[in-house]
Image: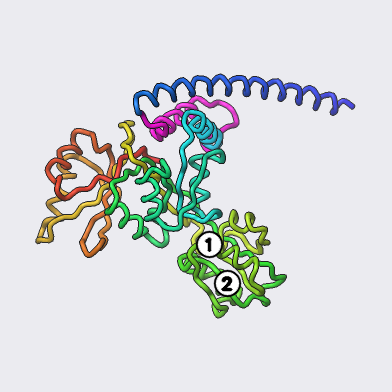
Amino acid sequence: MENEAQLKVLRNQLDSIDDEVLHLLNKRMEIVKLVGELKHKSGGAIYRPEREREIIKRLSGQSKGLLNESAIEAIFLEIFAVSRNLELPERVAFLGPVGTFTHQASEMRFGAMSEYLSVGSIGGVFEAVKTGRAKYGVIPIENSTSGMVYDTLRSFNEYNLKIIAHFSIPIHHSFATNCDSISQIKTIYSKDVAFGQCNNFLKEYALENVEKIPVESTAKAAKLALTEPNSAAICPKIAAKLNNLPILFENIEDNADNNTSFVIISNFDNAQSGNDNTAILAKIPQRSGSLVEFLEDFKVENINLEKIESHIIKGELAFYIAFNGHFKDENIQKIISKHSNEIKILGSYVKE
């Protein structure tokens, strides 16, 4: 009886706190609505990643309770998503279908309440944002195991859209099937990249000689494994759950630190936050020493390079370069002015 009485007191306290939280959230949303009206009149952007990061950083720094930065981020990203939808509902295009890692990444940044548009190709996501069918696009740009995503770089070369956010999520693959045992499996569906990321698992369970059929997405792999007899899928946990496909093994990837970086694209530039990175595509003249001369300018302006990779895009050699700073910073502007015919700015975004 004493425990029940204590539980009742604690539950009443929780109810009281919940009431207060709800009251404060409603108050916050009223202010958000006023801010949205002012932004709408001035033509300002609704999604400001640098402002969101600033809020999360400030709250994390002053938290003295059980909530760490990850917990605070998870809570407030959802609050931000609800706020944006109150200000002005805007569609988010992502590389689909539903149940892919890109879908998961999109919901992590834009929340469950946002309106989503599943698109079948990376170029299609760019086109959806360019034509206004979506305000934002979410696409993969690099995997820690497989490297840069060529279709993303090619689309940046073709479209004049900007990176407004860059973030990574861990990539965990599951092995899902309706079969009662592995010995019944005759076919495995997945993306070709996912097969390559799970070699050790396939060898350990003597599945390397089972027929492996590459499909365009791991979400489709889960759908096929649901209906095809004696088949399985290597897919994200979310894809298996959405299709009610039983999971036999989780986290089957070779590299436990496997992750994919995503970018959010839109048609505006972020404001300077004081803690930014910038990405560019550089097409440097093909002559001896030209790359060294180009990079020397970054050294002169004391700009730290974080990434440089060469790629052939539509028959031309291009360098994807990421570095510290915002493209509007004075020292970076000097480089952009000097190499205006060689540089395409892909966007400046707050560092993760």
10 Å neighbourhood of mark 2: few (<14), some, or many (≥20)? Answer: many
Q: Secondary structure at mark 2?
A: strand
Which stretch appears magenta? 44-70
- Residue 72 visible? The answer is no
- Amino acid carrying label 1: it is Thr
Q: Position of residue 95 (x, y in %)?
A: 45, 54
- In the displayed structure, 107 sits above or below 228; it is above
Query: What residue is rendered at 24% in x and 55% in y?
Result: 319
From the viewer's side, name the closer residue of 218 and 199: 218
In what quadrant of the picture does the N terminus appear? top right
Which label's residue is closer to the chain start, 1 or 2? 2
Query: What residue is rendered at 13% in x and 61% in y?
Result: 286
Residue 272 lies in quadrant: top left
In the displayed structure, does residue 213 sit left or right of residue 159?
A: right
Query: What residue is rendered at 42% in x and 58% in y?
Result: 121
In the displayed structure, does residue 50 sit left or right of residue 91?
A: left
From the viewer's side, name the closer residue of 197 and 317: 317
10 Å neighbourhood of mark 1: few (<14), some, or many (≥20)? Answer: many
Residue 37 is inside the magenta segment = no
In what quadrant of the picture does the C terminus appear? top left
Q: Secondary structure at mark 1?
A: helix
Outermost residue toward the right in this view? 1
- In the displayed structure, 162 sits above or below 254; it is above
Residue 51 is inside the magenta segment = yes
- In the displayed structure, 1 sits above or below 320; it is above
Q: Position of residue 287 (x, y in %)?
A: 10, 61
- Amino acid carrying label 2: it is Ile
Q: Which mark is residue 218?
A: 1
Q: Are marks 1 and 2 in contact (CB under 8 Å)?
A: no
Residue designated by label 2: 188
Query: What residue is rendered at 46% in x and 20% in y?
Result: 34
